[in-house]
Amino acid sequence: MTGGRGEYDAARVTEVEGRELMRKRPGMYVGSTGVRGLHQLVYEVASRSVNQILAGGGGCVDVTLTRDGGIRIADDGPGIPFEAAGGVCADDGLETLLTRPETELRPGGRNTAR
C-alpha cells in the first residue's frame, strides 16, 4: 500500500497490551471519551457488584458521588480472591485483573484472562 504517509509494512505494526490498549483507543472500549464513556465505565463497575449479588455473593451496593466530581462504588461481596491457586490472582494476577480490559472476574471466583 502506498500513499501520502509512506509505506505500510510489517515494520510499522506495533503490539500494544494491557492498559495501553485503552489509553490508545479509549472509545473502542467504552464507546466515547466524553460523558457517555464515563457513564459506561460507572455502569461496568456497578454491574459487577450487581452480578455478585445476583450470584448470592452479597446484598448491598453503595454508590457515592463525591464533592470533587468522582464516584465511589462499594459492595459487601466476597471481594477479589487473592489466594486463587494458579489462577488469575496468583502472584501479579491482581494487577492483571484490574488493568487488562480482556480479563474478567466472574461471580463465584471464576477468573478468565484471554
Image (tube, rainbow, N blue to C red):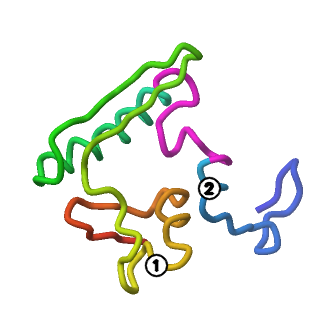
Q: Quadrant of the N terminus?
A: bottom right
Whole-Å distance between the Cαs marked 1 and 2? 19 Å
In this picture, which residue range is highlighted in magenta?
Answer: 23-36
Residue 103 pos. (x, y %): 43, 63
- Which residue is depicted at the point 45% across and 62% down? 102
The residue at 32%/37% (across/down) is 46
| Residue type (three-letter) at the residue carrying disc 2 | Arg
Residue identifier under label 2: 19
Residue 20: percent from left, percent from top: 67, 55
Q: Are marks 1 and 2 in contact (CB under 8 Å)?
A: no
> Does residue 114 show up?
no
Mark 2 Cα-neighbour bin, 10 Å: few <14, some 14–19, many ≥20: some
State which quadrant residue 81 falls in.
Answer: bottom left
Q: Position of residue 99 (x, y in %)?
A: 55, 57
- Residue 84 sits above or below residue 3 on the image: below
How dense is the environment of label 1, judged by Cα within 10 Å: few (below 14), some, or many (20 and up)? some
Front disc: 1 or 2 = 1
Q: Is residue 6 above or below residue 28?
A: below
Task: Kindly tell me whether residue 84 is visible in this rendering.
Answer: yes
Magenta span: predominant SS is helix
Residue closer to the observer: 77 or 102 = 77
Please name the residue shown 83% across and 52% down the image.
3
Front in this rendered view, residue 94 or 1: 94
Residue ID for mark 1: 90
Image position of 99 (left or right of 50): right
First in residue order: circle 1 vs circle 2 = 2
Q: From this viewpoint, which residue is outermost toward the top? A: 67
> Per the image, is 35 magenta?
yes
Secondary structure under the numbered disc 1 in the rendered image: loop
Q: Nearer the viewer, residue 24 or 87?
A: 87
Looking at the picture, how far across and down is residue 50, in whole percent? 21, 41
Relative to residue 69, is residue 98 depicted above or below? below
